[in-house]
Structure formats: C-alpha cells, structure tokens
Image (cartoon, rainbow, N blue to C red):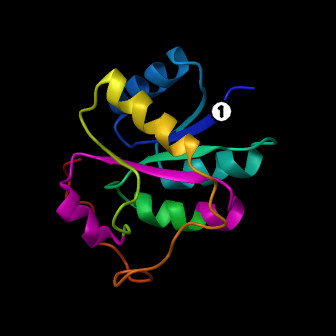
Amino acid sequence: MAAIVLVVDDEPAVLDVARDILETSGYQVLSAASGEEALALAREQQGPIHVLLTDLAMPGMNGRQLADRLSRLRPETRVMFMSALSREMIVDYGVPEGSPFVIKPFTIARLTEKVAQVLAQPARVAWPRTGPSAGRDAPKSPGSH
C-alpha cells in the first residue's frame, strides 16, 4: 500500500505541484486548500494518513495550528511543514526546532527526499507541543508564503 500524504496549501499552484510530484513518486495524496478542509478530509478518511505536509503561513488556521488539531484526531500522523519563510521565522509560529521542513519553492528531488525521510522516522505518539512558544497563538499570516 502506498503511503498517504495529506497536502495542505492555500495557494492552488503550490497545492497542484506538490500533489503531482508526490503522486508521480508513488504516494497517494489527499489535498486541501485550508486547515479546516484538511481536518474534514482527515475525519472522512477511513485509512491512515501517514504524513501531513502543510504550508505554515495560511489565512485562518496556520500550519502549526492544523498540526496541533490533526494530532488530536490522528496521533500517528507524521508532520512536515513547507514555507517560503526562513527557518528563523518559523519559530514565531511555535514550530519546534528540528521539525521536518521544506523550503518553497522546492525541487522534485528535495520534496520527495524530505517526505521519504519523514516516513522513515517512527510515528510519534502525538505532535510535539513543546518549546517556549507552544500553546500561544502564532502570528497572523504575513501575506507571502
């Protein structure tokens, strides 16, 4: 069975590219344009979701907030972020240092390599909600992803 990746990005072009890359690489892909849509898909999905690949800076629910909420529904789902923000800026969103992350724009090789690395790691019992910014609201989306 192919690993299932839930891809979430509010930019349709990025969502399409990520989905195409991952499907071509043999993954089964669920895609959503918002955190709310992703949670609805996760509730409807009968089987596992192996990886959540989410944009970090999105309007409404950002990627870190989505990871928190999805981990309550599916604690076995691995989490990986993508963003055009610098690594330093993602700390402001409450993302623990060392979390799987791919910078946009990404290459086919880079995205598939990072997803494979995430899948090679054991599934966590729950999304890590630790660190100095855990539990606080992240900044609003700066408008650029």
Q: Relative to the observer, which residue lies in front, 77 or 64?
A: 77
- Residue at (43% x, 63% y) in the render: 64
Residue 76 painted magenta: yes
What is the residue that sits farthest to the top in this orientation?
A: 24
Q: Please give the residue where the numbered disc 1 appears in the rendered image.
A: 3
Q: Disc 1 on helix, strand or loop?
A: loop
Amino acid type of disc 1? Ala
Is residue 125 toward the left or the right of residue 8 in the image? Answer: right
Q: Is residue 134 above or below residue 140?
A: below
- Residue at (52% x, 71% y) in the render: 128
Q: Quadrant of residue 73?
A: bottom right
Is residue 82 toward the left or the right of residue 35 in the image? Answer: left
Q: Quadrant of residue 126?
A: bottom right
Measured as percent of width and height from the top left, residue 117 is found at 48, 40
Measured as percent of width and height from the top left, residue 3 is found at 65, 32
- Residue at (52% x, 18% y) in the render: 25
Magenta extent? 70-94
Is residue 103 toward the left or the right of residue 51 in the image? Answer: left
- Residue at (55% x, 55% y) in the render: 36
Measured as percent of width and height from the top left, residue 92 is found at 25, 71
Q: Is residue 82 above or below residue 93?
A: above
Number of callouts = 1
Determine if residue 116 is in view. yes
Measured as percent of width and height from the top left, residue 15 is found at 41, 32
Is residue 87 toward the left or the right of residue 80 in the image? Answer: left
Q: Relative to the observer, which residue lies in front, 21 or 139?
A: 21
Q: Relative to the observer, which residue lies in front, 111 or 140?
A: 111
Determine if residue 140 is in view. no
